[in-house]
């Protein structure tokens, strides 16, 4: 991992890239925003109030990765196609993304990451802040995936880098790394949550805390979370624990309204003033809804998933007609 390209200098890209810089790795951040690239060239990359770290910065248009490069894919899924056509052969590709993009399957990446912490990047800057702590899971894609020498080197390098970032700079103290034998159970659990939080909060113009505080939003959130769990369970997909509860426990909690509502108020303070990435994307007319809810709809097949279908159609219409987010749009889903 001598030369590493972090493609997508957003919240996750800046956080992981910062750790790699702090460990002495040579890191190049690649982003489509020229203002962000200019800011990075002047100020470096930053996490919270930790000291900045120097790195190289390139716009996506000027990026030309060499053969044998290590590429951390931290873009939104809808940007993957533009990245994949640029990749040479061979390349070590490590996606750290929330959605499920079938176009990645052709590149046979054997190692992925999924973040349960929340990192929000300042606009047009390579400076992020970790607004909610959590884990960064890394693992093979599928229980049968092998771990070659390059993958093992990447895994160990990332673990050392995050440990050194905490020790040397005090950054990323809210983030813990966990290596797992199969990343898919954790990625599907994150999908279960994201496909409930993101479209509802983005459509209604709410922060993540308000999703638990506003009664009709909370009602829809619980219903969609329940439906997402059912789709994944019926598809025979194994789920992992992200956050305080395993999805099986979440399912049992949701079946008890008093307990669910009490826990909603317990978690509300930890989610206030944090926003899902879809909140910024929806007004621009492009979201990851295909990689979230459409993926769940396809997994459901002939099994009913009425709320996912309504949510999916609502977001598509808001994208195409540029309907501004508003709480009353949730009435279409109730």
Image (cartoon, grey):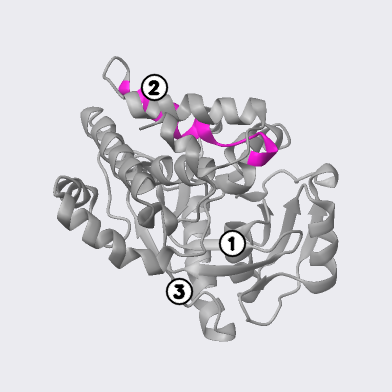
- Which residue sits at x=51%, y=61%? 274
Q: Position of residue 333 (x, y in %)?
A: 40, 31
On the question of residue 275 being in view, the answer is: yes
Q: How many other residues sit within 10 Å of disc 2, few (<14), some (14-19) or many (≥20)?
A: few
The numbered mark, 3 or 2, whose residue comes first in the sequence reads: 3
Compared to 8, does 282 lie above or below? Answer: above
Against 202, is 176 above or below?
below
Label 1: how many residues lie within 10 Å, few (<14), some (14-19) or many (20+)? many
| Quadrant assignment, res 19 | bottom right
> Is the magenta region chiefly helix, strand or loop?
helix
- N-terminal label among 1 and 3: 1
* Residue segment shown in magenta: 283-300
Q: Which residue bears the numbered disc 3?
A: 174
- CB atoms of marks 2 and 1 within 8 Å: no
In this picture, residue 76 sits left or right of residue 83: left
User: For residue 289: magenta?
Assistant: yes
In the foreground, 49 or 105: 49
**Disc 3 from disc 2: Cα separation:** 35 Å
* Sequence-earlier tag: 2 or 1: 1
The numbered dot on residue 120 is 1
- Identify residue for label 2: 298
């Amino acid at each position: 991992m001598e030369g590493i390209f972090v493609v997508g200098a957003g919240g996750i890209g800046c956080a992981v890239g910062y750790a790699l810089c702090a460990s002495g790795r040579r890191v190049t951040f690649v982003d489509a925003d020229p203002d962000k690239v200019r800011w990075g060239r002047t100020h470096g990359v930053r996490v919270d109030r930790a000291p900045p770290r120097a790195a190289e910065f390139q716009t996506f248009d000027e990026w030309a990765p060499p053969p044998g490069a290590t590429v951390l894919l931290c873009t939104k899924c809808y940007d993957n196609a533009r990245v994949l056509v640029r990749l040479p052969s061979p390349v070590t590709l490590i996606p750290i993304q929330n959605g499920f993009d079938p176009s990645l399957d052709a590149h046979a990446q054997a190692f992925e990451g999924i973040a349960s912490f929340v990192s929000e990047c300042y606009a047009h800057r390579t400076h992020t802040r970790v607004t909610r702590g959590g884990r960064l899971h890394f693992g093979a894609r599928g229980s049968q995936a092998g771990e070659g020498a390059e993958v093992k080197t990447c895994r160990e390098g990332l673990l050392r880098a995050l440990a050194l970032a905490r020790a040397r700079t005090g950054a990323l103290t809210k983030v813990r790394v966990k290596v797992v034998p199969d990343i898919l159970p954790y990625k599907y659990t994150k999908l279960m949550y994201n496909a409930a939080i993101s479209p509802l909060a983005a459509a209604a113009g709410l922060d993540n805390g308000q999703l638990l505080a506003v009664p009709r939003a909370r009602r829809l959130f619980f219903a969609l979370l329940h439906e997402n769990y059912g789709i994944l369970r019926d598809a025979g997909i194994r789920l992992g624990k992200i956050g305080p509860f395993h999805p099986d426990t979440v399912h049992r909690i949701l079946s008890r309204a008093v307990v669910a509502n009490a826990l909603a108020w317990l978690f509300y303070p930890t989610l206030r003033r944090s926003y899902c990435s879809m909140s910024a994307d929806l007004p621009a007319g492009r979201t990851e809804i295909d990689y979230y809810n459409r993926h769940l709809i396809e997994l459901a097949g002939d099994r009913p998933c009425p709320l996912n279908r309504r949510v999916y159609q609502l977001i598509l219409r808001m994208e195409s007609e540029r309907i501004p987010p508003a709480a009353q749009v949730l009435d279409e889903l109730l």
